[in-house]
Image (cartoon, coloured by chain):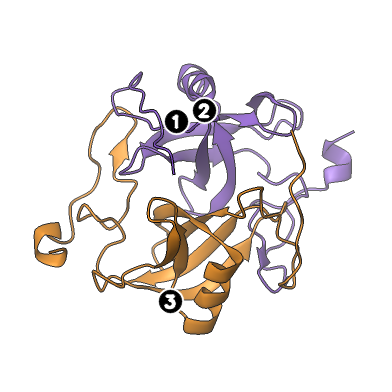
Chain colours: A orange, B purple
Amino acid sequence: MRQNDVVSTMSVDLAFGENELLPAVAQDAESGDVLMLAYVTEEALERSRETGHAHYYSRSRDELWHKGATSGHVQHVEGIRVDCDGDAILYLVDQDGGACHTGYESCFHRTIDGEVTDDPVFDPDEVYE
Amino acid sequence: MRQNDVVSTMSVDLAFGENELLPAVAQDAESGDVLMLAYVTEEALERSRETGHAHYYSRSRDELWHKGATSGHVQHVEGIRVDCDGDAILYLVDQDGGACHTGYESCFHRTIDGEVTDDPVFDPDEVYE
């Protein structure tokens, strides 16, 4: 496979791939729950650092994504980790409301056998118009 | 962007992308620490379920990857979660040794500013020949 281009705009080298996206995991800084996985661009990372709110890049809408801008369920960034290869990001966050648009705290609320493991924390019909 | 093909070989629909890989996060089932992010194919997922050891797909070696086969640092899979969109996987694992080939328990042992946040748990020179 082709090598990723390594850029170094931050203090660590980040290996943004050919589509300039890196996967980013959001983890609840207090409970340790893994909340979601999305993707970031350099701009999204910079906006997260500047604003203190987690930003991603929406692949479906093809635009910078301020998580919670619609729902109010923002993620307050308490730390950002980078993995050993510089090709994955970990946001440590304090999550307002829930991370998942289906009403759960975590997007990972199902087993691979389809069993729901969590209870919903909000009603998406009341949050999203 | 083009839509992913949705396949349904498990009990939940998994949206494997055009390269047939999904990102997979490994989390320590007990401590909650996020250990690493890698990628899985359907075969890797099936092997993880069959063997109880986390399997991934190595993009650099372009082959199925039994994590820990060389180092002995296998991940005992205690659960597998799927996210709401079926396009990301969460392995809940009991990690032997450390997940990171650099000697740390977690690959996410650095802040984005390059500060190392963890202590090493093994000497990679003794584990990898």
Q: Residue A12: percent from the left, percent from the top?
A: 74, 67
Q: Which residue is mark 2?
A: B20
Q: Looking at the rendering, which quadrant does residue B14 occupy?
A: top left
Q: Residues within 10 Å of mark 2 (few under 14, many from 20)?
A: few
Quarter of the figure with the N terminus of chain A? top right
Q: Residues within 10 Å of mark 1 (few under 14, many from 20)?
A: many
Left or right of residue B88: residue A44 = right
Label 2: element kind: loop
Q: Nearer the viewer, residue B49 or B3?
A: B3
Left or right of residue A83: residue A72 = left
Label 3: element kind: loop
Label 1: element kind: loop
The three-letter code of the residue at mark 2 reads Glu
Q: Which residue is mark 3?
A: A53
The three-letter code of the residue at mark 1 reads Phe
Q: Residue at x 19, y 56 (%)?
A: A103
Q: Residue A66: percent from the left, percent from the top?
A: 39, 70
Label 3 marks a residue whose chain is A
Residue A89 versus residue B40 in the image, above or below = below
Are labels 3 and 1 assigned to the same chain?
Answer: no
Label 1 marks a residue whose chain is B
Left or right of residue A25: residue A28 = left
> Alpha carbon of mark 3 to alpha carbon of mark 1: how far?
29 Å
Pointers 1 and 2 in contact (C-beta within 8 Å): yes
Q: Which residue is mark 1?
A: B16
Q: Looking at the rendering, which quadrant does residue A42 occupy?
A: bottom right
Are labels 3 and 2 assigned to the same chain?
Answer: no
